[in-house]
Amino acid sequence: MIKSCLNILALFVFACPIYAQQKPTAFINAKIIPIVGQPIEQGVLLVQNGKITAVGDAKSVRLSSDVQLIDVAGKVIMPGLVDSHSHIGEGSGGDGSAPIQPDVRLLDGINARAASFQRAQAGGITTVNVMPGSGHLDSGQTLYLKNRDNATKIDDLLIYDKDGKYMGGIKFANGTNSIRPGGGNFPGTRAKSAALVRDQFIKAQEYREKVKKAAGDPTKMPPRDLGMEALVEVLDGKRVIHFHTHRHDDIMTVLRLQKEFGFRVVLHHVSEGWKVADEIAKAKVPASVILIDSPGGKLETLDIKFETPGILDKAGVLVGFHTDDNITDSRWFMRTAGLAVRAGMSREKALYALTMANAKILDLGDRVGSLEAGKDADFIILSGDPFSVYTHVLQTWVEGNKVFDRSDPKDHLIAVGGDGAGTDREMHLDGDEDDLGGGQ
């Protein structure tokens, strides 16, 4: 009788999307994978005002009389996925005028209504680092975004730090992509690539010293240089470099530059990271890995291995995953972890790589990446085991708001594709969602 009442209540609640959770809402009876801590059978996830207020089993989580109950028996709840390297939003960065363009801001060249954001929602991605391309040594500043619904402009997706500044890193690259023999100011060799990057950081050091010596006196300040300002943020540890690199020798070049200038860096792709795993671990540098089951296209990725994430993890490297969307479609991000598990990585570390590791990589570990009290209510509801090929993302929630529901025909179209699935996103309409039972 109680279960029947809960199911009826669930139908009612899911027909009325919750915005800002003025009343506490409890998701009950699901298997909860909090990432930090052991899985909880018949768990309870309590959220209110966009935050997680409690997570545990029915005995440990006390529910008030005014709580709204959502019965998700037979389902799995885990944190929203964090993608540390994506190109959703049709963003563009540097142009062909120079190989290093730290002044370029992706903020000024991204479409917040692009359908690719909804594809990411369908894949369970709630937080994402959107990057400019890798055809430059430095193609500009990245953006850390929350995949909120109803975005009409990029400002609606921004994540702000404690000082009120929107968050992001900066994109660098070496190897094949940024080499353009005979390309004017662009490098023609790997050695010249490193020389140009080194030269820019020396100039940034000199610029920083001039600003320091001016001591706030406008008459002594150097002419303002937006590119130098961005690189000074890198030197001061305020902005992380996200470094596209594949070959082991290119990886070692990044580590050499990092040691010389002391900047914070995340290695991205690291196709040959397995060859220099101990060196990466010794440098205490995280790695964001992509796994694709149809490799090819670049000779520098010839030695890519599915075993790389597990090898790096065992060496002591903090390992995250990324889509590089649309290299891996955002809807299939979970599959990346499955490939890593098949190649020897533990289930726990693979799920950690999709969530908490990437949250740390983006300096967001205190806000997202795990289901813990006080963190943002970003979570996904799965139809079954995360690594089963038969499992689907049924719902995606961002800050306590449902942004994807597979039982909604509009969202189902985004999830499976078809005519109209690539149309720029429209705002969700209230009152036409169904319960979890309709998801396939």
Image (cartoon, grey):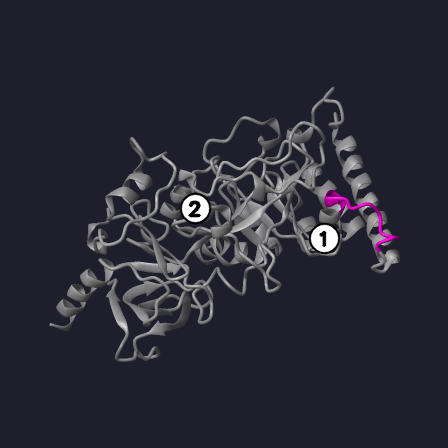
- Element type at mark 2: loop
Q: Is residue 274 visible?
A: no
Which quadrant is home to the N terminus?
A: bottom left
Asked if the stretch drawn in magenta spans residue 297, the answer is no
Mark pair 1, 2: CA separation: 30 Å
Outermost residue toward the front?
Answer: 219
Q: Which residue is mark 2?
A: 152
Outermost residue toward the top?
Answer: 182
* Crowding near the residue tagged with mark 2, few <14, some 14–19, many ≥20 C-alpha atoms within 10 Å: some
Q: Is residue 120 visible?
A: yes
Quarter assignment of residue 213:
bottom right
Three-letter residue code for mark 2: Thr
Q: Residue at x 83, y 59 (%)?
A: 216
The location of residue 369, given as percent across then percent down, is 48, 60
* Crowding near the residue tagged with mark 1, few <14, some 14–19, many ≥20 C-alpha atoms within 10 Å: some
- Position above or below: 382 against 227: below
The location of residue 367, given as percent across then percent down, is 51, 63
11 or 345: nearer the eye? 11
The first of marks 1 and 2 along the sequence is 2
Quarter assignment of residue 52:
bottom left
Q: Secondary structure of the magenta portion, mostly? A: loop
Q: Which residue is mark 1?
A: 233
Q: Residue at x 66, y 51 (%)?
A: 240
**Magenta-colored span:** 218-228
Asked if the stretch drawn in magenta spans residue 225, the answer is yes
